[in-house]
Image (cartoon, rainbow, N blue to C red):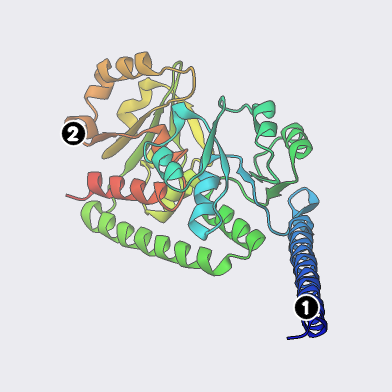
Amino acid sequence: MSKRLIMLIGAVLFVIALAACSSSAVEKEETGKTEETVNKEETSAEVTENNETRVVQDILGEVTIPVNPKRILASSSNYAEYLIEIGVTPQFAVVVPDIEPEYRAPYLEEHGVEMLKNKQYQYNYEQLLSTSPDLIVVAGKIIEPDVYEELSKIAPTVAVNAGSDMHGAMTELAELFGKQEAAEKILAAFDQKAKDAKEKINQAIGDKSVLILRVEPTRYRYLGPKADDDVSKFFYETLGLRSPEIFKDTTEWFTPFSLEILPDIKADYIFVEKRSMEDYDSSESLQELESNSLWKNMDAVKNNHVFPLKTNDYVQAKGPIGTGLLIDYIVEKLVP
């Protein structure tokens, strides 16, 4: 092969190799640009989604909240339960350890909710701020204006048009998060459970009377059957219990009374709540009641128809789970 031909072939191969390298570089550059463009577009879409907001109407006015909140803070453990049950798990929930029902801490842990321990009737605003919530949900009918104002400084705060009662709160929360169908199913199942319990109790005790007695450190109070309160309605409407005749028209929630009238109460069954609160002890008052001769002579006492009622289980435990457990307890005590 001539020297000239060899040089020609070498030149051709060099040109081909150079073209291949150039093509590869262009492809890498284009691939890099494409990946970078995709990443930028995905990041931009994510930011846009996270920054999207909507305006909702709560009990106090209009509130601008995230469309897709990622760090929801429930102002109480029962509101956390309402949210979880309709399919909106909050990331945080305020709890008061001394008054929480026994089942609720494990329940919240199971659903990955971080519990923020607070004093009763007090919020640790610094603690709440440190969690960086993007939405706070509170019971609008019982929130104090100054508390709402402080919470609103931490994150958008929705004061739903409800108190702590299950039907009202779950309905409002479901509307807020678009979970109406889930809430309707849960409430329908609960209503059926309550209806069945009411029938069982009626068959077992008929028109016999039931007293709900609250023992406090310095006084005794009874639950009014006609009070405009979800606790009264639960016992005397939902479960259909009959109040002692002497109290049948009482419209106040818990009314103080003197132990001197115990003989006139004539209750067939009594549920006694030794009220528990943080830094609060009703033990001495309960001992005084149980040692009182008038108490000992009541028919319910002599017939062993007196049952304990925990504050944690019927005040703080409101919710599909907690109230369901309370129904089971009442039926267990009243139905042989």
**Tag 2's secondary structure?**
loop
The kind of residue on which mark 1 rests is Gly
Measured Cα–Cα span from mark 1 to mark 2: 111 Å
Position in image of residue 97 (x %, y %):
47, 28
Q: Nearer the viewer, residue 37 or 26?
A: 26
Which mark is on residue 304?
A: 2
Density class for disc 1 (Cα within 10 Å; few <14, some 14-19, many ≥20) is few
Residue at horizontal 79 percent and vertical 80 percent from the top: 3
Comparing labels 1 and 2, the label whose residue is closer to the camera: 1
172 to 25, vertically: above or below: above
Q: Is residue 73 visible?
A: yes
**Tag 1's secondary structure?**
helix
Mark closest to the chain's N terminus, 1 or 2: 1
289 to 235, vertically: above or below: above
Position in image of residue 158 (x %, y %):
71, 48
Density class for disc 2 (Cα within 10 Å; few <14, some 14-19, many ≥20) is few
Which mark is on residue 10?
A: 1
157 to 206, vertically: above or below: above
